[in-house]
């Protein structure tokens, strides 16, 4: 290892607390565990500003209040907001995800709890929006302005968590069956290919 790497690692291990000294406070630095191959050469630096927004891949986080998706909700929240190095740090072998969540629930930071609350608020807003849309569709059908046969069935179901995005795509494909135009056939081919890629990714 080069001498400058040794010196950099030594400084990281003996770092003064953030805010000490003059000038701009240094960012907090964290080291890898002693058995990690990068322990002596690298450190992790915690960003104080301009924190990037993560984009989650796969189905959205379900509602907290839904019993049928409770385990998946707890697993997602713990994975995102509880510090961990291995799965056992999140949930032990003899625990359910719900039990692990309840044990850690009071330990979330204020900022993490705000994000968790906003996730639930987003679900409530979507639910109210879907209910309003359903009301408009039903009113339009009664007045003869809208034919619900051309509306995807998932749009007609209130309180839908949209947990399986591929199901919505499949239903959209079914709505194309009665349409035989070149543009629709192109869309049909595109969506089928998209579903195949989602199946191969094992993320849905």
Image: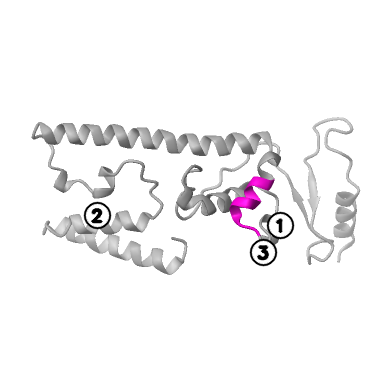
The residue at the point 79 percent across, 42 percent down is 28
Residues under numbered marks 3 and 2 in contact, where contact means CB atoms less than 8 Å apart: no
What is the number of the mark on residue 89?
Answer: 1
Dot 1 crowding, Cα within 10 Å, few <14, some 14–19, many 20+: few
The residue at the point 37 percent across, 37 percent down is 127
The kind of secondary structure element at disc 1 is: helix
Q: Main secondary structure of the magenta part?
A: helix
Front residue (pair 135, 98): 98
Magenta residue span: 95-103
Give the quadrant of the N terminus.
bottom right
Q: Is residue 166 above or below residue 103?
A: below
The kind of secondary structure element at disc 3 is: loop
Residues under numbered marks 3 and 1 in contact, where contact means CB atoms less than 8 Å apart: no
Provide the residue designation for mark 2: 172
Provide the residue designation for mark 3: 93
Quote the CA–CA distance across marks 3 and 1.
10 Å
- Could you tell which of marks 2 and 1 lies nearer the N-terminus? 1
- Could you tell which of marks 3 and 2 lies nearer the N-terminus? 3
The residue at the point 86 percent across, 53 percent down is 8
Quadrant of residue 107 within the rendered picture: top right
């Amino acid at each position: 290892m080069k001498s400058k790497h040794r010196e950099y690692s030594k400084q990281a291990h003996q770092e003064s607390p953030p805010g000490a000294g003059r000038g701009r406070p240094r960012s907090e630095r964290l080291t890898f565990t002693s058995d990690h191959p990068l322990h002596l050469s690298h450190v992790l630096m915690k960003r104080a500003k301009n924190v990037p927004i993560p984009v989650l891949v796969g189905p959205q986080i379900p509602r907290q209040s839904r019993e049928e998706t409770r385990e998946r909700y707890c697993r997602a929240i713990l994975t995102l907001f509880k510090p961990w190095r291995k799965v056992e740090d999140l949930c032990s072998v003899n625990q359910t995800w719900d039990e692990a969540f309840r044990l850690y629930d009071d330990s979330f930071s204020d900022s993490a709890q705000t994000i968790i609350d906003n996730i639930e608020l987003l679900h409530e807003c979507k639910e109210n929006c879907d209910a309003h849309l359903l009301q408009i569709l039903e009113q339009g059908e009664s007045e003869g302005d809208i034919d619900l046969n051309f509306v995807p069935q998932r749009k007609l179901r209130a309180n839908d968590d949209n947990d399986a995005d591929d199901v919505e795509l499949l239903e959209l494909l079914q709505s194309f069956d009665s349409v035989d135009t070149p543009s629709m056939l192109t869309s049909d081919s595109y969506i089928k290919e998209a579903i195949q890629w989602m199946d191969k990714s094992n993320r849905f």
